[in-house]
Image: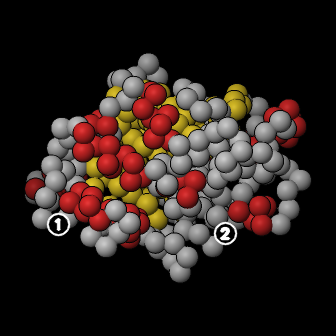
Amino acid sequence: MTLLKALLVSFLLVFNSITLAECQSQRVKVQVLGSGGPELTDGRASSSYLVWLDGKGIVLVDAGAGSSLNYEKTGAKLNDIETIVFSHFHVDHSADFSAYIKGTYFTNRTQDIQLFGPESNHLMPSATEFTHNFVGSKGVYPYLQDYVSAEKQSSYNVVAKNISLAKHKKQHVFQSKNYKLSAIPVYHGPLPSLAWRVDIAGCSIAFSGDMSNKFQTLAALAKGSDILIAHNAIPESQQGVGRKLHMPPSEIGKIAKQAGVKKLILSHRMNRTLGREKETLAIIKKYYKGLVLFANDMDIF
């Protein structure tokens, strides 16, 4: 057997052990660091989630405004974060990124952080551009440039990678010994956007990010997942730009049913959906009969 074949066999064994094993739910949890949107009147931090394994928060999904304060409240340790993934680079999903990076200065971190996000278009930077725009030599905070320097002047680097949006297919983005990350392009108007899935200890958690269902891709990514965290940013009656950018409750219900998810969590709750939970739930239940929960900051699932 050639070395290449041996490596491929090894990868497939690890891949199968992560994705096919029974969910070890006692080892895994996802914590909501931010359950709101971009408003500053909803009493919530903006979108962010932390995936825990064996008492360590290792995957950060988005880093919206206020999430770093809630992260501190969790008792998690910055040294434990292995990967940061972004659904897109709207402020309410990315504003606290530099706070996390600066915070690591006060630790003894030596392990690189892997960072993944969508590629660019005429409106938004790519993941690599975003990272350098924040903490690069010509970025907003150039004093943090050592964290992205090719010369690795700091004790660790942020290693960013762009995820292609060319094909509306599920992509296997990253594999570690403990988890696998997958992504798929979703439609959020003209903005490059991704939905994410974390397969970890036999469990699977899917994150819709902000999206309408124009591409009809989320169900494929979330297929059979233990938890789908879907963004409930608009009511069923919403029209105009909001409807083009986000999915109404009926669409969320259809996706959850099609994907056969075990539990549906509604997050990114904005003022236009807060207080309408009964209505939202009734619409979703027309399609999806499983457990539906509404997320608040610091909730653990």
Q: Residue at x 20, y 60 (%)?
A: 146
Density class for disc 1 (Cα within 10 Å; few <14, some 14-19, many ≥20) is few
Badge 1 or badge 2: first in the primary sequence = 1
Q: Nearer the viewer, residue 236 or 299?
A: 299
Q: Residue at x 30, y 52 (%)?
A: 114
Give left or right: position of 210 versus 126.
right
Three-letter amino acid code at the position of disc 1: Ala
SS for dot 2: loop
Three-letter amino acid code at the position of disc 2: Gly
Residue at which label 2 appears: 189
Q: Nearer the viewer, residue 64 or 41?
A: 41
190 over 182 or under it: above or below:
below
Give left or right: position of 280 versus 50.
right
**Residue 150's mark?**
1
Q: Nearer the viewer, residue 183 or 63?
A: 63
In percent of width and height, residue 163 lies at 42, 65
218 over 273 or under it: above or below:
below
SS for dot 1: loop
Give left or right: position of 11 versus 262.
left
94 over 200 or under it: above or below:
below
The image quarter containing residue 75 is top left
212 over 165 or under it: above or below:
above
The image quarter containing residue 13 is top left
Q: Residue at x 32, y 32 (%)?
A: 77
User: CA separation, marks 1 and 2?
Assistant: 34 Å
Q: Residue furthest bottom?
A: 122
In percent of width and height, residue 152 lies at 14, 59
Density class for disc 2 (Cα within 10 Å; few <14, some 14-19, many ≥20) is some
**Residue 230's mark?**
none
Q: Quadrant of the C terminus?
A: top right
Residue 237 visible in the picture = yes
